[in-house]
Amino acid sequence: MEDKLHSLKEWLTKEIKSRANEIDRDPQALKAAIQEMGDRSLLALKVPIELGGSGMSELDYRLLQVELARISGALTFLQTQHQSAAVMLSKSHNVSLQQDFLSQMATGKLLMGVGFSHLRRRGIPMVSAIETDSGYEISGEVPWITGYDFFTHFILGATLADGRELYGVLPLKNREEQQGSISLSEPMKLMAIASTNTVSARINHWCLNKAQVVSIKPAESIHQSSRNNILNHGWYALGCAYAGLDILLAAAQEKQLDFLQESWNSLNLEVEQCKGKAVDLATHDTASYSQKLQLRATAINLAQRCSQAAIIASSGAANYLGSNAARVYREALLFSVSGQTTDVMEASIKQIISNK
């Protein structure tokens, strides 16, 4: 697996780094990049080998995500949606669904997204499912689905009458037929990763056949999952912090200003320490939820500070839309709120206040 990590880092450095700004803005450039990952069989990394994946360990997968986020936030975010869908399918009891999709997902012959972050919202469910003789009738608003025109399908999360969570595969396209309708918005005008074609969806009486059901989980499962995996999104923030450091170091070397080098030394030490703690937690998993939460908030804080240092060190050139510093600064925004829970929001705000 070390060879795969090494080859990925080499590919990112040689082939993707110089295209990162284009990939951030141009869906076609992003489409080419994710297919290059598919050509290297890097799109089902945590899926067991016997199901067509790489069988990568949790730690290796997280270290790979750091390297991806260090180079391109858009590519990182898009492939994460697909990798999440692949893992969900690999854990499904629906063997037929696995056979239909998983064999094509590792190589990018088929790409799939997810749409269930709305399940984290309290109150009246945004998407509801009613059981029928043939499956489930689904209606509601999905506020966030990344990957329109990249992904052919997505795994939708809906709430059953008793609070259980239904996950099923739907086409990611506009559909109007007897079995209901799916209406997608135009791609959102996002500050960061606009090329990922994020849309919302209105689903009206869509009939989900039982054969398309990935899983049915107990009520509140997504909240428990968020607690169990509270550190996961912190790895992306770490990658973003490294991206800011790379720009800061380049500026220090170009401008020959001692304080820039000293700033890099100080920030780099903090990022390395944070990464070391994250690796330790992933290896031994002995920390409490509170400790993991604080470490994630620290990673977010470092992404913000390192990207801001990159902006300042780049001077006026950072204000160009196509500058690396501006892109990484926007990506720090993205990775500050990705997979956010109320606990993460509170911990992140408190770290900002404590650093005043």
Image (spheres, helix red, strand yellow):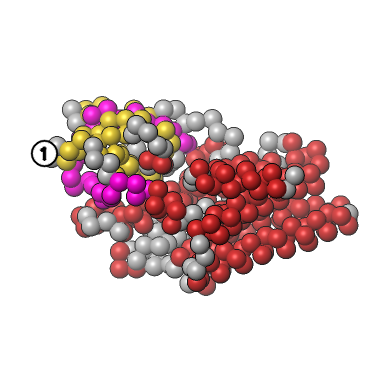
Q: Is residue 220 magenta?
A: yes
Which part of the image, by quadrant, shows the C terminus? top right
Q: Is residue 226 left or right of residue 73?
A: left
Q: Please say whether residue 286 is visible from this viewpoint.
A: yes
Q: Position of residue 86 (x, y in %)?
A: 36, 55
Q: At 48% from the left edge and 63% from the top edge, which residue is drawn?
A: 61
Relative to 136, does residue 109 appear above or below in the rendering? below
Residue that appears at 47% across and 36% down:
197
Hey, which quadrant is residue 326 in on the image? top right
Task: Residue 42 in the image: state x and y as whole percent.
Answer: 45, 60
Name the spot of residue 285 as percent of width and height, x first. Answer: 48, 68
The secondary structure making up most of the magenta span is: strand
Q: Nearer the viewer, residue 271 or 10?
A: 271
Q: Amino acid at mark 1?
A: Asp
For the record, the magenta segment spans: 197-222
Assign a secondary structure to mark 1. loop
Q: Position of residue 322 (x, y in %)?
A: 68, 39
331 shown above or below 83: above
Q: Residues within 10 Å of mark 1 (few under 14, many from 20)?
A: few
| Quarter residue 276 falls in | bottom right
Determine which residue is flagged by label 1: 133
At x 37%, y 40%, the residue is 119
